[in-house]
């Protein structure tokens, strides 16, 4: 199963082989400093990671860690998955 990192507008990274790999990358992108990351499970194969507050940026987007199928089932537009990763 392939896992992806997206938000409400952009495709961030993926696919990853496992959820743990995707979460590790999301924690890196979010500059995670907490021992336990803040993650909410929305449904099967769809998790929302909220990174810590960034004093330089003053905000950070939440990262959705999910399979493509789970994202589409939640109403995410398929066009997001066609974007190149940066």
Image (cartoon, grey):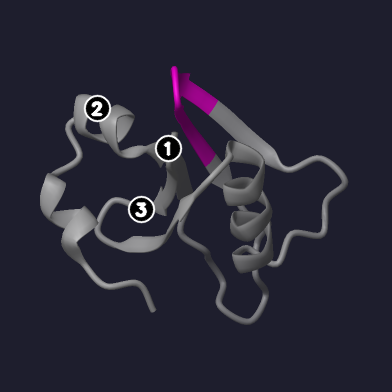
Q: Is residue 4 left or right of residue 81?
A: right
- Asked if labels 2 and 1 touch by Cβ distance under 8 angstroms, the answer is yes
Please state which of the two labelled residues, at mark 1 or mark 3, is closer to the viewer: 1
Q: Secondary structure at mark 3?
A: loop
Magenta residues, start to end: 41-48
Quadrant location of the C terminus in the rendered image:
bottom left
For the residues marked 3 and 2, what is the alpha-carbon distance in whole angstroms? 12 Å
Nearer-N-terminus badge (3/2):
3
Label at residue 7? 3
Nearer-N-terminus badge (1/3):
3
- Vertical relation: 2 (above or below) 47: below
Q: Nearer the viewer, residue 25 or 57?
A: 25
Specify the farthest residue to the right.
Answer: 35
Q: Residue under circle 1?
A: 66
Q: Residue at x 30, y 39 (%)?
A: 68
Q: Residue at x 52, y 63 (%)?
A: 60
| Percent of width and height locating residue 33 | 82, 59
For the residues marked 1 and 3, what is the alpha-carbon distance in whole angstroms? 10 Å
- Asked if labels 2 and 3 touch by Cβ distance under 8 angstroms, the answer is no
- Vertical relation: 18 (above or below) 52: above
Look at the image and say whether residue 45 sits in the magenta stretch. yes
Q: Is residue 47 left or right of residue 30?
A: left
Nearer-N-terminus badge (1/2):
1
């Amino acid at each position: 199963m392939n896992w992806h990192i997206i938000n409400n507008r952009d495709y961030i990274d993926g696919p990853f082989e496992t959820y743990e790999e995707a979460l590790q990358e999301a924690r890196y992108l979010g500059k995670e400093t907490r021992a336990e990351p803040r993650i909410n499970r929305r449904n099967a194969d769809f998790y929302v990671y909220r990174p810590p507050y960034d004093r330089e940026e003053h905000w950070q987007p939440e990262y959705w860690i999910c399979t493509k199928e789970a994202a589409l089932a939640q109403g995410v537009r398929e066009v997001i998955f066609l974007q190149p990763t940066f």
